[in-house]
Amino acid sequence: MAIQTTTQRQTLAVAYGAAALWGAAYTTAPGSAAGTEVTGGSPAYARKALSWGGSNGVVTASATFDIPAGTTVVGVGVHSASAAGTYLDGASVTSQAFASQGTYVVTFTYTQT
């Protein structure tokens, strides 16, 4: 059965955001398991806390990651904790290579239909 109301779609989208508290960047594509997470750099790479917001069954959260030189980002994902925790979801992105230390900005989007 399809969800008929925007209220219920929003309730489920908010629940997704409540579980997906930390964003991550990967050097391999995620799927049913997380990709290989970025490491190193100065400033050092770290997962970023996500603050979700939205309406009508769509929630988004943005994060800016510090990426070390020589790294290619090919995926992103969400986790339940800042370290370890549970991998919850992920997606491939258009790959971006970093010849020097830089930042990678991503907007995570979840749509409940």
Image (cartoon, rainbow, N blue to C red):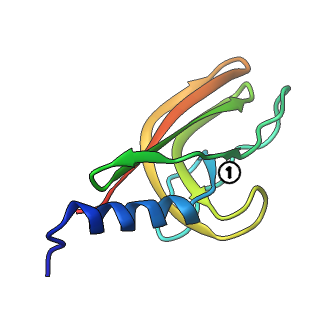
Q: Is residue 105 left or right of residue 6?
A: right
Q: Is residue 32 left or right of residue 67?
A: left
Please count the marks in the image: 1
The residue shown at (71%, 46%) is 47
Q: Could you tell me which secondary element the residue under label 1 belongs to?
A: loop
Q: Observer-nearest residue: 1 or 26?
A: 1
Coordinates of residue 55 in the picture (x, y in percent):
33, 48
Amino acid identity at mark 1: Glu
Coordinates of residue 74 in the picture (x, y in percent):
51, 42
Question: Which corner quadrant holds the N terminus?
Answer: bottom left
The residue where tag 1 is placed is 37
Which residue is most to the top?
A: 100
Coordinates of residue 66 in the picture (x, y in percent):
72, 30
User: In this picture, is 34 found above or below 105?
Assistant: below
Question: Which corner quadrant holds the C terminus?
Answer: bottom left
**Label 1 Cα neighbours within 10 Å, binned few <14 / some 14-19 / many ≥20:** some
Q: Is residue 29 left or right of residue 50?
A: left
User: In this picture, is 36 found above or below 31?
Assistant: above
The residue shown at (57%, 37%) is 73
